[in-house]
Amino acid sequence: FEQLDRERQPDVERARRERPRDADWLVAQAGGARGGWDWSLYRPFVRLALEHALPIVAANLSRADATRVVREGYGAAFDAPTRAALGLDAVPGALLAAHEREVDVGHCGAMPAAMLAPMARAQLARDAALALAIAPHASRGVVLLTGNGHARTDIGVPRWLPPELRAVPRSNGLLEGAGDAGIPAA
């Protein structure tokens, strides 16, 4: 779940021990305090995972960690061996540029130019954190509930998976808004 910050995994496990089939309890203990998520959209997935005793992985890089990446670089959220394994210390220029464009578009062109690269690094770090969280579950099959940008197979989470897993991901979108001209047909 992108909706659960990675440091909340102990809260997820504790909530499951305390009330094993209570999605509302898990959300309240592990995700409810953080604003910005409409849990009515994600609670059914939590409930489904609990009903079938599936792993629930708190996968997202927290806002605080992402802010530190903006200010200090990838070392603020990842140790040296992890950065080396992921290739974060040598991100291809085209990948960074693609994320800069996405940040710029996502902020309606109002983001100061000097902030595009740091903000893009935060998005790349989020994608990498999400990939690290799901990779251990890939052999069994995994579903990542995440936003459109993270789900992109060209520049999103799949790009950060180990090479043997990169060809496997499929991204499925659940889109709302009938006839919304802003949603690309692809």
Image: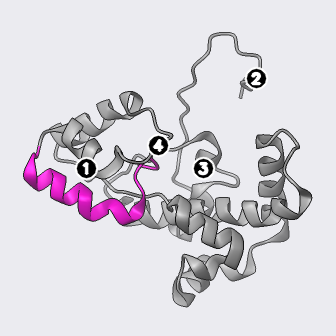
Please tell me whether mark 1 or mark 3 is closer to you in this view.
1
**Residue that label 1 marks:** 29
* 37 or 82, nearer to the observer: 37
Q: Secondary structure at mark 4?
A: loop
Q: If you read the primary sequence from the N terminus, does the residue marked by circle 2 or circle 3 appear first?
A: 3
C-beta proximity under 8 Å, tags 4 and 1: no
**Residue that label 2 marks:** 182
Amino acid on which disc 1 is placed: Gln
Please tell me whether mark 2 or mark 1 is closer to you in this view.
1
Amino acid on which disc 3 is placed: His
In the depicted structure, whether residue 62 falls above or below residue 145: below
What's the residue at 56%, 32% (across, down)? Answer: 173
Residue 150, which numbered label?
A: 3
What's the residue at 25%, 64% (across, down)? Answer: 10
Q: If you read the primary sequence from the N terminus, does the residue marked by circle 2 or circle 1 appear first?
A: 1
Q: CA distance from mark 3 to mark 4?
A: 19 Å
* 19 or 142, nearer to the observer: 19
Q: Position of residue 42 (x, y in %)?
A: 38, 34
**Residue that label 4 marks:** 35
C-beta proximity under 8 Å, tags 1 and 3: no
Residue at the far top in the pictured view: 179
- Magenta segment: does it hold 6? yes
Q: If you read the primary sequence from the N terminus, does the residue marked by circle 1 or circle 3 appear first?
A: 1
Q: Position of residue 93 (x, y in %)?
A: 84, 69
